[in-house]
Amino acid sequence: MGCDHGSASVEASLVLPVFIFAMLTVFAMAGCIRTRTVIYEGLHETAAYLAEYSYAYELAEKGADMGPYAEGMADGVSLVLANRKIREYIDDKGTVNTYVDGGMSGVKVINAELSDDGFVCLKVRYMLKINLPFAGGSTVGCVDRIRQRAYLGYDRSQDDDDDDEYVYVAENGSVYHNSRSCYHIRISVRSVSGEVLDDRYSGLSACRICGRYKSNGVIYVTEQGDKYHYSLGCSGLKRTIYRKKKSECGGLPQCSECGKR
């Protein structure tokens, strides 16, 4: 039994350091991940700020009176402004100071621009410190990028789709309609007595969907339909209509009725 106790002690002395090393490594990696998250959140908020700022800058460029903010508009989306704002927006500065080489000063926005297509583009670089127990420390270069739509408003003069009107197409339809009120796609339902059908409806047959149910004395018909229905909620009385751009209709011809209007 004494030998067994000694063997257990040796195994414990070997396993415990490995376990401690593994846990410390996990904590170190978690700190690195946390740091990257904190910096990216700051970068995201900086991009959002500059996206709003871009609108004011555009107004200033057009000669608008910006009052006390005019001096701040001079550089637009600049590296100086981006670096100042990211340092303001990084919340957990303690974590950054611990895991980034150079601390907060080591987080540097190296590219900040407003692209021709209206996006604020930022790029930040920093050296992440990885301290592994018993293995010493090292640094890894990290780069994060973000692309945020600038809030520049809507310029109708640049809208190339003004002539591409919206039309209406029924599911499995073979034509498009200019109006949703076109009688070819607008279903007009009437309720009539199921006991006595006049000549207008004498040629109708029961709907295959709801015709197997018992009638409550009232049936439902449509103007152009060839079936009668026992239920107002029958899917045969409903039609799916899609609103889409005319250019998306795949060359469908115009409805003959809509063409008369």
Image: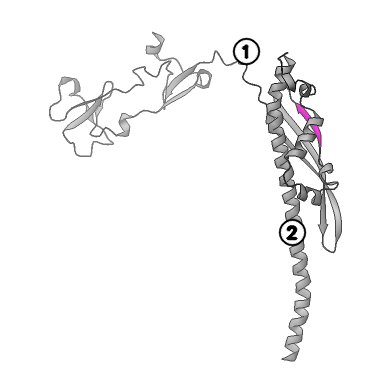
Which residue is painted at 71% across and 46% down in the image? 37
Give the mark count: 2
Please, is residue 31 above or below residue 59 in the view?
A: below
Q: Is residue 117 visible?
A: no
For residue 206, what is the image quadrant? top left
Residue where numbered disc 1 is placed: 157
Residue 212 occupies quadrant: top left
SS category of the residue bearing label 1: helix
Residue 23 visible from this viewpoint: yes
Q: Secondary structure at mark 2?
A: helix
Whether residue 12 is in magenta: the answer is no
Which amino acid lies under the numbered mark 2 shown in the image of this protein? Phe
Q: Is residue 114 magenta?
A: yes
Q: Which residues, given as a range, are shown in magenta?
A: 109-115
Q: Nearer the viewer, residue 40 or 117?
A: 40
Give residue 102's position: percent from left, percent from top.
Answer: 86, 46
